[in-house]
Image (spheres, helix red, strand yellow):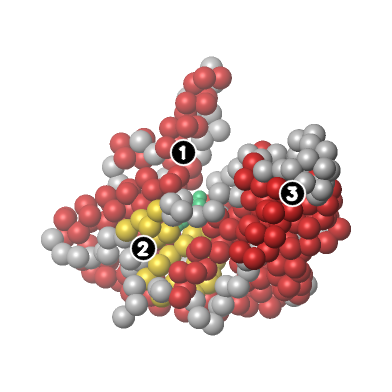
Amino acid sequence: MKKISLTGIKPTGDLHIGNYFGAIKPALELANEYDARYFIADYHALNTMKDPKELNSTIRQVAAGWLASGLDPEKVIFYRQSSIPEVFELTTMLMAFTAKGLMNRAHAYKAAIGENQSKGDDTDAGINMGLFTYPVLMAADIIIFDSDVVPVGKDQEQHIEMAQDIAQSINANYKQQVLKIPQAAVQENVAVVPGLDGRKMSKSYGNVIPLFATEKILRKTVMRIVTNSQSVEEPKNPDESQIFQLYKLFTNKEEQDALASRFRNGGMGWGEAKEELFRVINRCLSPMRERYEAIMADIPALDKILEQGAQKARPIAAATVKRFRKAAGVD
Ligand code: TRP
């Protein structure tokens, strides 16, 4: 039997090419090796997103984005967290085994407290119980599907350790393997994608190249890439240019070598280099954009895909809860 991998996707809008190369693409590749499960963590998002219209549309945008990027709902299980009520039942059960002190140590919670203190605000200002118990819900997401591995960025490693802690204390209490202990697969060597200004591409820096923008906006965005004041004639170092770093993500070795030597020989200005970059980005993104637009044009069909995924997921989730209830004497 194949091992199970599970990827939780926070629905934050406006996917960009940093998300694609840093998270979406490597996560989709797991489907070759694992029995892969992907879900939209919409109740996690509720902690911070209180505008119903925004949350509702972001959920669809992110789901459509993953489908347009190649997620095959026939091959993997793809669902919304909120469609699996068993996750919340398990969350309640996990709470009984989660030390409050463990939650006090969560990085995200500590950062929120620290920020309040440095502003001189009340320690708990703006902190809801959803934020405080975030790691428990995440542990339930993972544990309920008997996940073997959870591919995550470094920032999520602590959450996996907490899921392990909670599951281990349950197994220890009942002196049997009620729950599977998940392992983190920390993605170390995924591409760091530079943004328009050369810093890491990130929504918070406002330096992103959107994944599904129109061709016109894509072109405009690429033209905004920050360059130095070297003239057209001057030879340029490809390794010092984010244009070339971005180009590498979309091209094969032959194309990369060709552009690198044009940089080094001089005679290619930044404007022309950006045109060339736009061409290869658009070549890759056009078919994805078309798929994305087609999916977004039929939301009922998208919802049906997610609902079918939930139907595949629920019996697995129910079996875990049943096992736990039996072990706990709540059967
Ligand atoms: N916390 C994750 C993030 O911010 C999202 C997430 C929620 C998740 N539940 C999960 C990731 C379960 C992996 C497994 O990206």
The residue depicted at 67 percent of the width and 43 percent of the height is 237
Q: Amino acid at mark 1?
A: Ala
Q: Which mark is residue 108?
A: 1
Q: CA distance from mark 1 to mark 2?
A: 22 Å
Q: Which residue is mark 3?
A: 265
Residue furthest left in the image: 175
Nearest the viewer among 200 and 71 is 200
In this rendering, would 139 be left or right of 288? left
In the shown orientation, is residue 136 left or right of residue 31?
left
Note whether 114 is above or below 194 in the view shown. Answer: above
Disc 2 target residue: 149
Label 2 crowd bin: few (<14), some (14–19), many (20+), radius 10 Å: many
Q: Secondary structure at mark 3?
A: helix
Q: CA distance from mark 1 to mark 3?
A: 49 Å
Q: Are marks 1 and 3 in contact (CB under 8 Å)?
A: no
Above or below residue 185? Residue 327 is below
Q: Residue at x 50, y 55 (%)?
A: 190
State which mark lies toward you, 2 or 3: 3
- Tag 2: residue type? Val
Could you tell whether 23 is left or right of 101 in the image? right
Residue drawn at the location 77% of the way across and 46% of the way down = 266
Q: Are marks 2 and 3 in contact (CB under 8 Å)?
A: no
